[in-house]
Amino acid sequence: MKKSNKTNPISATILIVFMLLCLPATTVCAQSEPEYLMEIGGGVGVTGYLGDFNGNLTSDLQPMGTLVLRRLFNPWAGLKFSGSVGKLKGSAKDVETFYPDVQPDVDPATYKRLVYDFNKTLIDVSAVFEYNFLPYGTGNDYRGAKRLVPYIFGGLGATYVNGDGSNVFTMNLPMGLGVKYKVAKRLNLGVEWGIHFSMSDELDGMKDPYFVKSKGAFKNTDCYQTLLLTLTYSFKAKCRTCHNADEN
């Protein structure tokens, strides 16, 4: 007797139903990784004065601490708010340019050289827009995000410098670049370098040491750099049913 090659209709129906049931489960697994809208944390690093008395990125680096709050729009972009406290330090002893009022002099009482220097407290508050070159995440969500991504930032900030009997409040334009790494689902490690272009020439306590008047927002003004290591915690998971709006 010949064996029949016909497929059992009942078996085929059961197989099709099983496959259809598996499809939603697969979709859920691919999209099960939550997308968080906020990050909060802090960091430590160094800051350095750049101006009339220093043009070297590695000179007079001082400690700095920062607090960070980040609002994420999507895996590519976000808005970061930060408040930082550090020190600004510099001296005229190594300056090759001749400044009439700040050249080394001699104390007639002790015969010791007198050199203009400053040591001030710096407070910076800023809001910057961050753009990631790759989608950022654990790699387990439906976008295929990466754990390690480079990014750039730019925005607007305010600077307050106090010490040595004077204080200065001015605006600044921060910009820079960094790298962030997803340590865990809710932990983010970042390293960033930035430079803050201030609108004042008095962060070092000395205005126009050249005695040459300048015009424009950033003509002969002081600035400072920051190099920070941050750790943030992600919270406020995005509604799972809202992701379709970002896929268009």
Image (spheres, grey):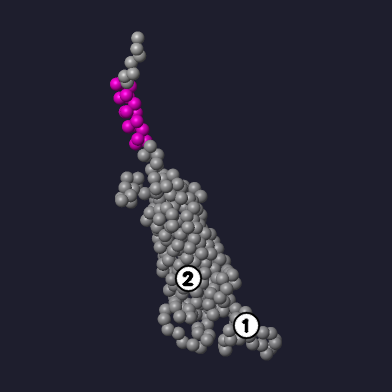
- Image-quadrant location for residue 105: bottom right
Which disc, if any, is residue 85?
Answer: none
Q: Is residue 15 magenta?
A: yes
Disc 2 is placed on an element classified as: strand
Residue at image mark 2: 196
- Identify the image quadrant of residue 199: bottom left
Q: CA distance from mark 1 to mark 2?
A: 27 Å
Nearest the camera: 225 or 149?
Answer: 149
Q: Position of residue 234 (x, y in %)?
A: 44, 52
Q: Residue furthest front?
A: 2
Q: Nearer the viewer, residue 166 or 205?
A: 205
- In the image, residue 4 sits, relative to residue 209, either above or below, namely above
Instruction: Report the residue at 62% width, 83% height from top.
Output: 115
Of callouts 1 and 2, the N-terminal one? 1
The magenta region covers 8-25
Task: Name the residue beneath numbered marker 1.
Answer: 115
102, 74: nearer the viewer: 74
Local crowd size for mark 1, using a 10 Å CA cut-off: few (<14), some (14–19), many (≥20): some
> Magenta part mainly helix, strand or loop?
helix
Amino acid marked by disc 2: His
Circle 2 residues within 10 Å: few <14, some 14–19, many ≥20? many
Residue 119 image position (x, y, % from top left):
57, 75
Q: Secondary structure at mark 1?
A: loop
Q: Is residue 172 visible?
A: yes
- Eyeballing the image, is 50 above or below 114? above
Q: Position of residue 10 (x, y in %)?
A: 30, 21
Residue drawn at the location 60% of the way across and 81% of the way down: 95
Counting from the top left corner in percent of width and height, residue 50 is at: 53, 74
Question: Which amino acid is tagged 1?
Answer: Val
Work out whether 69 lies above or below 20: below
